[in-house]
Amino acid sequence: MFRRHHLDSGQRTADSGQRTADSGQRTADSAVKTMLSLHSLSTFISRLILVITIKRWWQIRTLKRQWSDDRSLRKAAIKKDWFGVLEVFHFERSYMEIKRGARLIALS
């Protein structure tokens, strides 16, 4: 009877050790999964920042091109005495719209 109890006790100790090892393995697996999810989140965030930066750059590029086109038209209108164009096309209003667009880009 004592011997059987002693074996059961040893068996329990071995099972307990196995459970502890399994628990340690699960903890390690959990840590690896957490690290992988943090890495994928970090990768996603860095790519999102890159996309936002490219979008802003493209919007600013578009506004600069619009401003350049407006200045070119104004110079051509002055040079060729197209006073009708100068009266109809409001450069100040166009400038204010471009400036407003640039502010919106800066705030977003």
Image (spheres, rainbow, N blue to C red):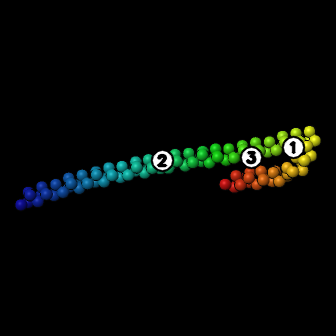
What whole-number distance in Å separates the C-alpha atoms at marks 2 and 3? 35 Å
Q: Is residue 28 left or right of residue 39?
A: left
Disc 2 versus disc 1: nearer the observer: 1
What secondary structure is marked by label 2?
helix
Residue 1 position (above or below residue 59): below
Q: Number of callouts in the render?
A: 3
Q: Position of residue 12 (x, y in %)?
A: 18, 57
Q: Which mark is residue 74?
A: 1
Write down the residue under mark 3.
Answer: 63
Write down the residue under mark 2.
Answer: 40
Q: Quadrant of residue 72?
A: top right
Q: Is residue 95 left or right of residue 26?
A: right
Disc 1 versus disc 3: nearer the observer: 1
What secondary structure is marked by label 3?
helix
Q: What's under tag 1, amino acid-wise?
A: Arg
Q: What's under tag 2, amino acid-wise?
A: Ser
